Each structure stands twice: as C-alpha cells, then as structure tokens.
C-alpha cells in the first residue's frame, strides 16, 4: 500500500482521558471536537505524517460545573489556549501492528515531546459508502504539570484532589480520501 491522505471519521472516533480524583477513584472525560491531517500507509505507519488538533473547550466529563472549571484559568484557560495539538516527529514499529508514535504536544502554551502506543486495528471497506476505512487505538499518558496545569487542592487525609498523570485513550477511524 502507498501513502495516501486519510480523513478522520468523527462519528466513529473518540478522544478520552482519565485522571485520579481524591486519590481514590478516577474521573473520565472526552473531547468532543477534534480534527486530523493524516498522510499514511495504514499498514506501515513508520512513514506517516500525523497532525491532530483538539478543541479543548469541547471537554465533557458529564458534569457541567466541572467542565466549566476545567475551561477556566485554573486549568485549560480556553479563551487564551483553545487547542491541544499533536504533530508526529518519529514513528517506530514495535510489533506486528503496534507502534510508538512520538511527537510534539502543545497545550496551554507549552510544547513538549510525548510518546503514545498506537495499534493498527485493520482495514475494511465500508458497506454503506464503499470507502476504504482503517482503525487505530491509541494509549498514552501525560503529566498535566508539564503543561502548567497545576491547580489543585490538598486533602485533609493527605494527597491532592486531582492527580498529575492523565491517561489518554483514543479510538480512531479514518477514511481514505478518494
């Protein structure tokens, strides 16, 4: 297969995260608006060019008060920093369908290299549209403090209200551009 342009299928993709809350549980959420520019051979990602943009204001933790707090200057400060972006810089094959994708994450005015595990889930022809589709699963972790997201509250039992490690998971489906 050759390198082609692939368009993100937002209806069949999701960007999710989880973070420790009160040192005893996890809060999960999603970003509902995101886009991508993908040039790739999905069966060999080592030569791919991947660019993702997430609209940070689209955060959804199923709690409006918490979402509004996350959009505020205490956290994402979406008025000033509306996007989280990722641009791939290196992709290494780790197994038959597994890759380590390293790139620059820009969030809250700070850019740092991060690595994510990407699993190629397969290719299929969409029976409704006839388009060629590919699927990928993404997993990784970033530290929110690395991006200046340091708001927190101490707990009287010890520890803090919000953990520093953010687990990122994505299920991505793309459609080959005609």
Image (cartoon, grey):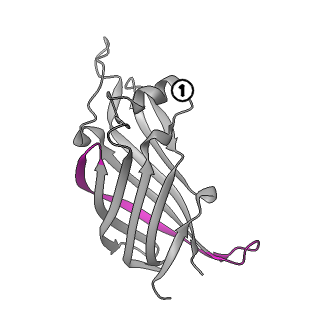
Q: Is the magenta region chiefly helix, strand or loop?
A: strand
Point out residue 8 in the picture as x, y percentages from the top left corner: 54, 65
Point out residue 87 in the picture as x, y percentages from the top left corner: 33, 63
When the figure is inspected, residue 65 is found, relative to residue 171, above or below; the finding is: above
Residue displayed at 48% across by 58% down: 35
Q: Quadrant of residue 145?
A: top left
Indicate the quadrant containing the C terminus: top left, top right, bottom left or bottom right.
bottom right
- The span shown in magenta is 107-132
User: Magenta span has 120?
Assistant: yes
| Secondary structure category for the residue under label 1 | helix
Question: Pointer 1: what residue?
Answer: 64
Residue displayed at 28% across by 17% down: 154
When the figure is inspected, residue 171 is found, relative to residue 67, above or below; the finding is: below
Point out residue 91 in the picture as x, y percentages from the top left corner: 33, 72
For the residue pair 126 and 81, the one nearer the viewer reads as 81
Q: Quadrant of residue 78?
A: top left
Residue displayed at 52% across by 49% down: 33
When the figure is inspected, residue 165 is found, relative to residue 171, above or below; the finding is: above
Residue displayed at 30% across by 19% down: 153
Does residue 126 appear to the left or right of 14 in the view shown? right
């Amino acid at each position: 297969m050759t390198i082609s342009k692939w368009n993100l299928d937002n209806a069949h993709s999701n960007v999710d995260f989880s973070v420790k809350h009160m040192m005893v549980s996890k809060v999960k959420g999603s970003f509902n608006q995101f886009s991508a520019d993908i040039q790739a051979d999905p069966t060999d990602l080592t030569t791919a060019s991947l660019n993702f943009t997430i609209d940070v204001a689209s955060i959804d933790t199923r709690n409006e008060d918490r979402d509004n707090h996350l959009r505020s200057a205490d956290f994402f400060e979406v008025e000033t920093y509306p996007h989280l972006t990722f641009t791939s810089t290196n992709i290494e094959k780790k197994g038959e369908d597994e890759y380590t994708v390293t790139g620059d994450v820009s969030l809250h005015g700070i850019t740092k290299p991060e690595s994510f595990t990407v699993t190629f889930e397969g290719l299929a022809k969409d029976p409704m549209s006839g388009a060629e589709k590919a699927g990928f699963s993404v997993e990784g972790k970033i530290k929110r403090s690395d991006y200046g997201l340091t708001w927190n509250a101490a707990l009287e039992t010890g520890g803090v209200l919000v953990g520093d490690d953010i687990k990122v998971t994505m299920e991505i489906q793309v459609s080959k551009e005609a």
